[in-house]
Image (spheres, rainbow, N blue to C red):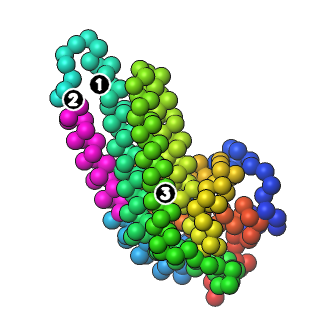
Amino acid sequence: MDDSHVLEPRQERRLVSDYIEGISTAADGFRFLCRYPSLWQYGVWALLTNIAVAFASLLMTFWIGTSAWTSFATELPIAWWTPIVEWIGFIAILMLAFGIGLACYILLQSVFCAWAFSKLAYRVELFLGSTPDELSEISYSGQIIDALRSALKLLLIDVGILFLNIIPLIGTVAALVIGGYMHAWVLGAEFLGYPQELRGIRWKDRQQFARRWLPSTLGLGTIVAGLMLIPIVGAMFQTTAVVGAVLLNRRINGLPDNPGFDIEN
């Protein structure tokens, strides 16, 4: 990372390279923790709780999806147009179940993981040269309220996507594209917000920051959403994505992402 120091805050988005940088956050965080292994101790609790949360969210997604599909399939008549309706219904139920699962994940993660993620981000910030005076955490209740906002936003988006499936073919394709985009946006903004919370930045300002650096946000959200589908290993790399989000946030704001030495003291 020696070549990634930035002396001034970024002024312009770089689209493709920013998106790739966002996708690379989990790997960047993993490499950073392997390079400075003493920081792993602050991620153990986050890792364990995140595994439990991811497992519970996957169970919720599976239960909602299978229940909704069983109810839907039993009501279908036998007709020539049944396969078309069946396909549209399958995509709609899949998107709805995934959206509810993500909302459940965000809420559970905020209750059980946010504190541990915040502490991990705090230690990384200190390791990279920030001082305690520069960092001022949002209260735990404030974190919960912000998470509720994100989850509600995600649910409203998924309700709109569900209605899009009413339009044959085009609506289904639009639902997949818009749904993927919005899920990546919400999760990316959530993870990019962890280092910003340490500086007392509230939800609306974090959302504005995420919009300004949209390609990075979408890249980060894409990898986080994908990792949610991989048991245990995905939870580990979601934890390292928090570290990667700290490094990404520092690079965007013109702060060094390296402590200035190669071997820990």
**Where the N terminus falls, by quadrant?**
bottom right
- Specify the amino acid type for callout 3: Arg
- How crowded is the residue under tag 1: few (<14 C-alpha within 10 Å), some, or many (20+)? some
Identify the disc placed on residue 86. 1
x%, y% of residue 41? 48, 80
Q: Position of residue 123 (x, y in %)?
A: 58, 79
Q: Residues within 10 Å of mark 2 (few under 14, many from 20)?
A: some
**Is residue 37 in sight in this rendering?**
no
Circle 2/circle 3 CB separation < 8 Å: no
* Contact, mark 1 vs mark 3 (Cβ under 8 Å): no
**Residue 176 rendering spot, x and y as whole percentages:** 46, 34
Establish if 254 lies above or below 61: below
Q: Report the span colored magenta.
A: 53-72
Q: Is residue 69 magenta?
A: yes
Residue ID for mark 3: 149
| Above-or-below relation of 187 to 256 | above
User: In front of the other: label 2 or label 3?
Assistant: 3
* In contact (CB < 8 Å): disc 2 and disc 1: yes
Q: Which residue is mark 2?
A: 73
Q: Residue 131 sits in which quadrant?
A: bottom right
